[in-house]
Amino acid sequence: MTMFKGIDYYDIESELSQEARLVRDTARAFVEREFLPSIREHYRAGTFPLELVPRMGALGMFGANLSGYGLPAIDNISYGLLMQELERGDSGLRSFASVQGALVMYPILTFGSEAQKQRWLPLLASGRAIGCFGLTEHDHGSDPAGMTTRAVKRGNGYLLSGVKMWITNGAVADLALVWAKLDGEIRGFLVERGTPGFTANEVVGKLSLRASVTAELVLDEAFVPEENLLPDAVGLKSALKCLNQARYGIVWGALGAAMACFDEVLVHSAERMVFGRPLAAFQLTQAKLADMLTEITKGQLLALQLGRLKELGKMRPEQVSLAKRNNVRMALETARTARGILGAVGISDEYQSMRHMCNLESVDTYEGTYEIHTLALGRDLTGIDAIS
């Protein structure tokens, strides 16, 4: 297997620090040597390679841009490149790391008690514990404020009742961060595996994100002790802060998927003979390759500037919306175009473009659909809320 060299038409490499290159190259080698050889079998079986979780923890891939409690504290561009390389392997791999770090470790670090931080952050960072983020419900995806999951104070704790859906890592998680309404206000609760009244049912029959564990979380008066309430997670804005951290990773991750597809068809089109000529010799093929490269390069520049803003503490949610909306849809279109260039063989899992294409259908939907991010930008531009 030839090591992936990356797509860098605008010499972004010259903008990267030594640390960023080291993070990217370490993740690239991990994906190449330890993940890609088994992804086809896992995708067919609908399984995630849990055996790689301790290795990812040892490499510092969980909560990598967080600081304190022994966390790596890498800069945000380095973190973005890490997400890029993981999703170049598969969206399921990046999703696992993104949920673990941005949607479980980040809220514990930001909103949790000292005891919660001391207990859970080292376990999650090392991969000795797996976390999931329980926000979405069957009827409340784009409208999380309408959630029906409830928490009721009972003695020295709370009883949680409700159902969460499409929860990445849910069926293998040791810890679920569940959002529920307590006296009408959204709060975050740490629900541990084995809690009576709490079950996680794996979702089967998926045609996308097959190499990822997705679950339905059912809470039937599950008792959560008072010390498992995140003290500073108050209101929907707390959950949305977590989602913005994860969306930032998606902005970069989608680039990795697009790069994988582009690289695959660039090689294929040079080798595939049609009418006695390489497929790459045809004008329509060259036009498609030029368009794909242009859109990837634009996405890279968006991600790079967003990373700079995040590093300076100046990143706004609407800027994340713009980049998530653009880069994921771009990657999806790139994967579709790549599948077309591959022709009939493109539907075979010997090639990766259709796997990425199917995965990106989910990435285009989760953590804010293309349409919701469109309306978030519209609201920011006009001052008029067209969502509700």
Image (spheres, helix red, strand yellow):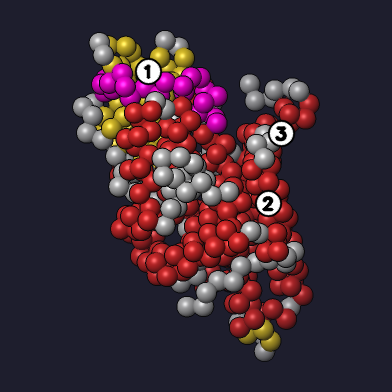
Q: Which mark is residue 18?
A: none
Q: Is residue 301 left or right of residue 91?
A: right
Few, some or many residues within 10 Å of mark 3 (<14, 14–19, 20+): many
What whole-number distance in Å separates the C-alpha atoms at marks 3 and 1? 31 Å
Quarter-wise, where is residue 231 in the image? top left
Near-viewer residue (73 or 80): 73
Circle nearer the viewer, 1 or 2 = 2
The answer to whether any part of residue 95 appears in the image is: no
Q: Mark 1 sits on what residue?
A: 150
Give coordinates of residue 33: x percent, y percent. Answer: 42, 70
Give x and y (percent) for residue 301: 72, 54
Pointer 2 residue: 304
Give the extent of the magenta segment: 220-241
| Circle 1 crowding by C-alpha within 10 Å: few under 14, some 14–19, many from 20 | many
Q: Amino acid at mark 1?
A: Arg
Tell me whether circle 2 and circle 3 mark residues in contact (CB < 8 Å): no
Label 2: element kind: helix
- Name the residue nearer the viewer: 332 or 320: 320
Give the CA distance from mark 1 to mark 2: 40 Å
Q: Secondary structure at mark 1?
A: strand
